[in-house]
């Protein structure tokens, strides 16, 4: 439920493994991603670079490289599986000198992503984090209609978030501002037959009243991949009852 492994990221990094470059920035980017385990953790510098690369540089460049100009201009999205297959088997998409064209595309877009990361999160790559971009905001339906103080009381977040649309813990990223657009808000682990051993979490809490302490108290558990005991039997429920 909390697995942030990205198989597409792993496949893209594998494509970079045999490549080299003459310019310093591309060399640094290649070395930075070499050996990375493709886990999109919120505090991962490599995840930040890899996601900026594929979201804002590689996808667009791939469309422009393999489609006619009018078709590339008409599309705003790139199917990840189509792109991966085209990059892994360049002869199917790139025409003559396919492998060389593919490699040049990978290197040029990776350099562009590295330069954007320097602008957005600074010149020290060790300080980059995917969670500085990718965030969850539990926005109340009334948020746009109330004053700032009330908005802060009824909204929960922003919360730094790991994962992506391609990880088991699904977390679709909006490329314009990196906000999480969908994913699981409730997680259950049910131990059938030993019901009191079950676990759950509900984002952001279990009360709809912003003044209630249980309005947002589960948000930190949800963000960290933790759970609370899901009491089931009468004895267990009575043992944790706060009020009736």
Image (spheres, helix red, strand yellow):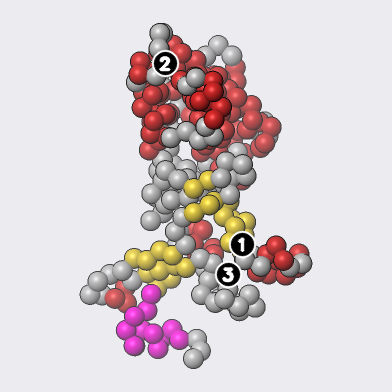
Q: Earlier in the sequence, mark 1 or mark 3?
A: 1
Percent across and percent down for residue 182 are 49, 54
Residue range of the region highlighted in magenta in the rendering? 230-241
Q: Is residue 225 magenta?
A: no
Marks 2 and 3 sit apart, C-alpha to C-alpha, by 51 Å
Residue named by callout 1: 139
Mark nearest the camera among 2 and 1 is 2
Q: Is residue 117 above or below residue 97?
A: below
Residue named by callout 2: 94
Look at the numbered disc 2 and give the secondary structure of its residue: loop
In the image shown, does 62 or 167 lie closer to the viewer? Answer: 62
Q: Earlier in the sequence, mark 2 or mark 3?
A: 2
Residue drawn where x is 68% and y is 64% of the image:
143
Q: Is residue 165 above or below residue 187?
A: above
* Crowding at mark 2 (Cα within 10 Å: few <14, some 14-19, many 20+): some
Percent across and percent down for residue 88 are 36, 23
Q: Is residue 227 among the parts visible in the rendering?
A: no
Q: Is residue 33 above or below residue 94?
A: below
In the image shown, does 138 or 26 lie closer to the viewer? Answer: 138
Residue drawn where x is 26% and y is 75% of the image:
194
Q: What quarter of the picture does the N terminus occupy?
A: bottom left
Residue named by callout 3: 216
Q: Is residue 119 above or below residue 186?
A: above
Percent across and percent down for residue 80 are 42, 34
Find residue 109 and report its image quarter. top right
Look at the numbered disc 3 and give the secondary structure of its residue: loop
Residue drawn where x is 44% and y is 23% of the image:
16
Percent across and percent down for residue 169 are 42, 52
């Amino acid at each position: 439920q909390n697995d942030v492994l990205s198989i597409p990221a792993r496949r893209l990094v594998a494509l970079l493994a045999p490549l080299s470059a003459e310019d310093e920035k591309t060399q640094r980017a290649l070395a930075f991603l070499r050996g990375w385990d493709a886990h999109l953790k919120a505090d991962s510098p490599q995840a930040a670079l890899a996601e900026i690369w594929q979201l804002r540089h590689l996808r667009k460049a791939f469309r422009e490289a393999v489609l006619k100009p009018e078709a590339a201009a008409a599309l705003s999205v790139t199917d990840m599986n189509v792109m991966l297959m085209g990059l892994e088997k360049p002869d199917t998409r790139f025409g003559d000198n396919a492998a060389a064209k593919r490699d040049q595309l990978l290197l040029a877009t990776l350099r562009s992503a590295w330069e954007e990361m320097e602008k957005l999160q600074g010149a020290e790559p060790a300080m980059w984090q995917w969670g500085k971009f990718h965030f969850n905001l539990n926005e109340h339906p009334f948020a746009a209609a109330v004053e700032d103080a009330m908005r802060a009381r009824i909204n929960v977040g922003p919360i730094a978030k790991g994962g992506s649309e391609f990880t088991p813990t699904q977390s679709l990223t909006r490329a314009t501002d990196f906000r999480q657009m969908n994913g699981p808000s409730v997680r259950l682990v049910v131990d059938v037959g030993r019901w009191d051993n079950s676990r759950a979490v509900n984002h952001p809490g279990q009360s709809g009243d912003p003044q209630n302490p249980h309005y947002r108290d589960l948000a930190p558990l949800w963000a960290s991949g933790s759970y609370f005991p899901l009491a089931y039997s009468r004895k267990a429920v009575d043992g944790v009852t706060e009020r009736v």
